[in-house]
Image: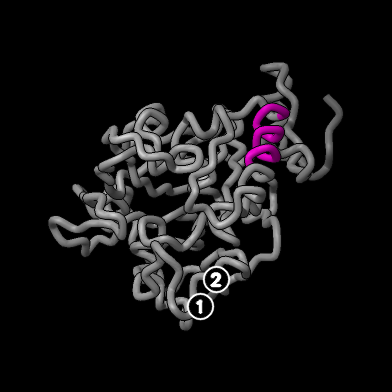
Amino acid sequence: MPRNPSTPLAVLLLGLLTGACVRSTAPDASPVPALRLYALDCGHIDVKDMGFFADGSPPGGKPGELIVPCFVIQHPRGTLVWDTGLSDGLPVGAEDPVGNRLRLETSLAAQLQKLGLTPADVSYVGFSHLHADHAGNANAFPTSTWLLQRRELEWATRTPAPPGVDPSRFSAWREARVQLLDGELDVFGDGTVRIIPTPGHTPGHQSLVLRLRQAGTYVLSGDLCHTRENWEHHGVPAFNDSREDTLASISRVEALVKDSHGAFVVEHAPEDFKALPAFPAALE
């Protein structure tokens, strides 16, 4: 092994004894940074009629359940919370605008505490969109940088508020550091955590693409699809902002998942949530 004047003698001797090579510290030789993805239970929706979420929203009469998750992504350069679930202050017996029952078993704050985090430790908060079941705890993060598509904030803050939007849940946007996006964002600058626009459900809807070291590519899809059936058959509920935009977004993400041999997470699907490591275990 030739000696580099800047290499300590002990390292050279260890390399000669073990046959190991001194590893380059150049940026292009670095491995993919270790990410950790935690899936948090941030509520449940007891649905009276799942037909409401099917293609075209035909009445079906069959009840069901939607999970309301939050996600914590830990990166060497910071922590990102993706979607903030139902409000920690949700009253017992609460219902959504169409009469579905809302339930919360454990607060987001308590789950963050279990990870040794407070809202002040969170670098970024990203919202797939600003419906109340995805932005319920937005105001808990006044010191974090909020990541939103410009079109989403403009849409969600109009008067009167769009259906499903509760402006009081994210009113801190006026004081928070808001990074308004007009397309994609590489959150940490290394390609491992990317926000991509997926409009259709709302005008500024977005999804999160993770490149995990062991598990590979995962797409946290917000409400791009509400059920796995909609993902598999390109179903679009009647209440979406744009059927055309939704179908185009599904097709783009479908190609991304196929090319990367990745996994698509339907955030509201209980089966997809259960397939992720049970909190506080992480996917890496």
Which residue is at 33% across, 48% downward? 115
Asked if the magenta segment contains residue 254, the reply would be: yes
The residue identified by callout 2 is 155
Q: What residue type is labelled 1?
A: Arg
- Whether residue 10 sits left or right of residue 42 in the image: it is right
Q: In this view, does 185 lie above or below 54?
A: below
* Vertical arrangement, residue 172 with respect to residue 4, above or below: below
Instruction: Point out the stretch of residues depicted in magenta.
Output: 250-259
- Residue 87 in view, yes or no: yes
| Left or right of 184, for residue 81 | left
Secondary structure mainly formed by the magenta segment:
helix
Classify 68 as above or below 264.
Answer: below
Residue 38 seen from this side: no
Q: Does the magenta stretch include residue 229?
A: no
* Residue found 30% across the figure and 44% down from its top: 41
Query: Which of these two is toward me, 264 or 178?
Result: 264
Q: Can you give x and y, in whole percent of width and height, for residue 86 in the image?
A: 31, 56
Q: Are marks 1 and 2 in contact (CB under 8 Å)?
A: yes
| Secondary-structure class at tag 1 | loop
Residue 146 in the image, given as x and y percentages of width and height: 52, 67
Task: Tell me where residue 113 appears, x and y as whole percent.
Answer: 28, 54
Indicate left or right for 79 with 8 as reference: left
* Residue closest to the eye, 279 or 34: 279
Image point 56% across, 29% down: which residue?
233
Dot 1 corresponds to which residue? 158
**Residue found at the very far right of the displayed protein:** 2
Q: In this view, does 277 lie above or below 120?
A: above
Numbered badge on residue 276: none
Q: Residue furthest front?
A: 59
| Spot occupied by residue 89 in the image (x, y as percentages of width and height) | 21, 64
